[in-house]
Image (cartoon, rainbow, N blue to C red):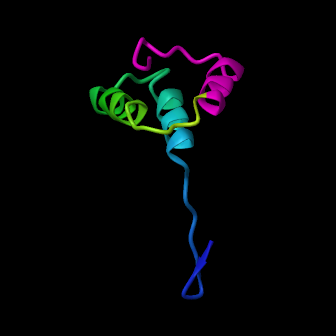
């Protein structure tokens, strides 16, 4: 994305959620876990995309998402 001549990168909520799930696989942080709970409760998430990557990356969800 380009704004006022600067290149800006954005991440989707779904990919942010997946990234946080990757991060907590080794280092379980209460802050990351709360972020995951908050993000997963948002409306209109593309759950097919999220579940695809959870399975592909073999992520342990720690029962954080429903």
**Image-based side of 46 in relation to 17, left or right:** right
Residue 31, percent across and down?
29, 33
Q: Is residue 51 magenta?
A: yes
Q: Residue at x 30, y 29 (%)?
A: 34
**Image-based side of 40 in relation to 15, left or right:** left
Instruction: Judge by depth and name the residue closer to the eye, 6 or 23.
Output: 6
Q: Is residue 65 magenta?
A: yes
The magenta-colored residue range is 48-66
Q: Residue at x 67, y 22 (%)?
A: 57
Q: Quarter holding the N terminus?
A: bottom right
State the residue lying farthest toward the front: 44
Q: Quadrant of residue 30?
A: top left
Residue 51, percent across and down?
62, 23
Instruction: Judge by depth and name the residue closer to the eye, 13 or 20.
Output: 13
Residue 47, percent across and down?
58, 29
Task: Say how many tags the image has.
Answer: 0
Instruction: Judge by depth and name the residue closer to the eye, 43 or 21.
Output: 43
**Image-based side of 3 in relation to 58, left or right:** left
State the residue lying farthest toward the bottom: 4
Q: Quarter holding the C terminus?
A: top left
Vertical placement of residue 1 versus 57, above or below: below
Q: Residue at x 58, y 64 (%)?
A: 9
């Amino acid at each position: 994305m380009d704004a006022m001549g600067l290149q800006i990168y954005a991440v989707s909520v779904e990919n942010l959620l997946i990234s946080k799930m990757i991060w907590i696989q080794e280092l379980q942080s209460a802050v990351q876990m709360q972020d995951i709970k908050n993000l997963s409760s948002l409306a209109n998430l593309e759950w097919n995309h999220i579940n695809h990557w959870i399975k592909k990356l073999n992520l342990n969800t720690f029962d954080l998402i429903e």
